[in-house]
Amino acid sequence: MKAILQQLREHVGAALHSALGEQAAGADPEISRAKDAKHGDYQCNAAMGLAKRLGAKPREVAQKIVEALPAAALEMLETPEIAGPGFINFKIKQVFLEASIGAVAAADDGHLGIDRVAARDAQTVVVDYSSPNVAKEMHVGHLRSTIIGDTIARVMSFQGHRVIRQNHLGDWGTQFGKIILALWHLCMGKRQGETVADFNRLADELSRIAKATIDAKRPLLQKRRDIHQENLASDPTGSEFHSYLEALQPSFEILLPAYRYVNALEEAAEGTDLTVTDAQSGETYPLSGVSRYVAAMLQGKAGRDNTQELTAWKKAKDATLRECNAIYRRLGVLLTDDDICGESFYEPLLPGVVEELKSALSASDGQSGEIRAVCRDDKGAVCVFLEKPDGSPVFKGAQGDPLPMLIQKSDGASLYATTDLAATLYRTHHATTHPYALRTKALAETLAKPPFNNGLGADRVIYFVGFPQKLHFEMLFATVGALGWLRKGARTIRMEHVSFGSVLGEDRKMLRTRAGDTVKLKDLLEEAVQRAEALVRASEADAEKRRGFTEDEIRSIAETVGIGSVKYADLCQNRNTDYVFSWDKMLALQGNTAPYLLYAYARIRSIYRKGAESISPSVDTRVTLNHPAERALAMKVLQLGEIVEVVSDNLLPNFLCDYLYDLAGRFMTFYESCPVLQADGAAEKASRLALCDVTARALRIGLGLLGISTLDRM
Ligand code: ARG
């Protein structure tokens, strides 16, 4: 079924055309939901703008539009009213609403009768979300990206778009030298009898002395260097390391302390003259830069066999994925290993991308877009400068100097931005629907082969990444715009950075544990479930509230409510703002919370179950909307499809939350004023039960789009 809003848009669109002819061509019918129910259900605001354009009186234009409405519009509408400066107010006829909600009640499609987009309008949408980093715990910032991104992915699939989830895992770059080195220390430390706890302690000690004078920190650093050198010499070919890796099942418990150690050691060694010599190659490098050397090795740049480094890197990646997957499963998000497309995936494209930018962006003339991009060397590094048409820089540093996007360092290393350029190419390019005229032949060839297989051909790419990366994405979008990569026939590929604010503690500072550490997602979710369980148990201990749940039921309710509360508390905020994380608020049974909605759902289901038993299947289930509360409820149920459309456009899940909260509220009003189980006669009872049923279905679908499952009993 087509959404009412959509039907009105089409009718008014037709009226605009027949009343005003070509003058109104392409004009937006400007239909919106009425702010105040007193004025009707919807309103049209198009007359004012059109009147200005035509030099006519707005109310007269409005009158013409009303007179030109097609017959089908009049079947759904009471006589439209013109108000104020030229608004047209629409009230939907009761019979039309009854027929519509009746059709929804009868539609058993799991989709509440909501239309999917027509095949020709279905878009390929790439959603880049979660995207944590290897060997790092996911933090609350990744939580926001994960659940907001997941909601949008679900919303767009529900509409019928082709959604491609991409988990842009941070799995490449200089920090990988540190990870590999951490594993090496774990392996070789065994010779000195060093344990994970020792590395933790050493990391603490080294961070403490990092800022001390060189003389003060030398003894400990010298000792660590000597052990390092000794270990290198004792296993020059790395065969011991290799067999250690083969047998290793690394977990965060062992990886993170060792990783901290490497970080702390290198930081403390900064500025000292301590060096280490590679036993095999004889090369000497600073103690503060060992990991950089290892990273170069991983990337095969040292011209030496890098199997060991690759194995270590893969182990660390596996450990991270195990950790992430456990969180994804608990959170009930859709991401799986199939969606992992990390930074390392793009490695083969990077040299070609740099070449392509150098050749396509060698000068700003000849570029058509608003913002021009020029790629040039800057002290040995390759940079993209973004300029306005008058030549002034789009992005400026603190001193007002042009701020370029760095795509290759002077040592030849590529960067986060280079990978994102390659990712954009892979995601938007398509051999048949959107082929790029790439200048770099090798790049085109690599793109055509596995694993790139000619690209994904996206019409829209959405990045769910925190606010601090705003500049990065602005530069990225400007550069690919200037390259012409976003022009797809007559359309432009939509690139969006969906950012979000921070999660704050009750003290309005960044959320931290009591001990002052960053909050680990795993612990946060566990606490949510425990708190929810305590609440269920407390209510079970109360003779008046007791429902007699089994142990299994208690645990499953606690899981759904606990996780649902954390997700909902996040999603119901406008994502652009920071919000204060409050257990009491998110777990409350009153207010715009998951427990309130889950409870409303369970309650409606229970009313329905009771009522349905006594309804004979032969009763005509026509839905009647004689009471204003019935009408208001039905109207809201019918608007779910409109809200889905709004959210897929503005990428603000809080609109869906507000809708669900309002829907549950309207149900409560309806239930207070319209007896369901004690209704007057079988027909009224059946009609009201049908309203209960469609409301429950709308709630379940809506919560499902937020990735929150429902409970039949609570
Ligand atoms: N791994 C990055 C981080 O944790 C986020 C990556 C976002 N996606 C992207 N295509 N840049 O900050």
Image (spheres, rainbow, N blue to C red):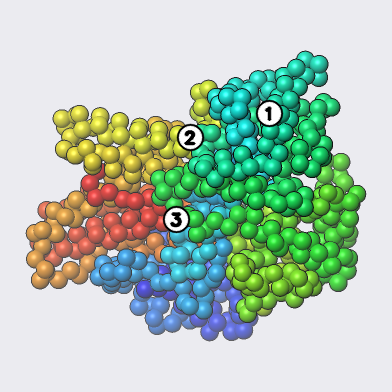
The x, y position of residue 252, in whole percent, is 52, 37
Secondary structure state at the residue bearing disc 2: loop
Query: Could you tell me the amino acid type at mark 3?
Result: Leu
User: Whole-Å distance between the Cαs marked 3 and 1?
Assistant: 36 Å
Secondary structure state at the residue bearing disc 1: helix
Vertical arrangement, residue 396 with respect to residue 487, above or below: above
Residue carrying label 2: 581
Q: Which residue is drawn at 68% across and 76% down?
A: 435
Q: Which quadrant of the figure has residue 428?
A: bottom right
Residue carrying label 3: 334
Q: Which residue is drawn at 27% across and 35% down?
A: 536
User: Can residue 210 be spotted in the picture?
Assistant: no
Q: State yes or no: discs 3 and 2 in contact (Cβ < 8 Å).
A: no
- Residue nearest the viewer, comparing 171 with 416: 171
Query: Could you tell me the amino acid type at mark 1?
Result: Ala
**Of marks 3 and 1, the one in the foreground:** 1
Residue carrying label 1: 264
Query: Could you tell me the amino acid type at mark 2?
Result: Phe
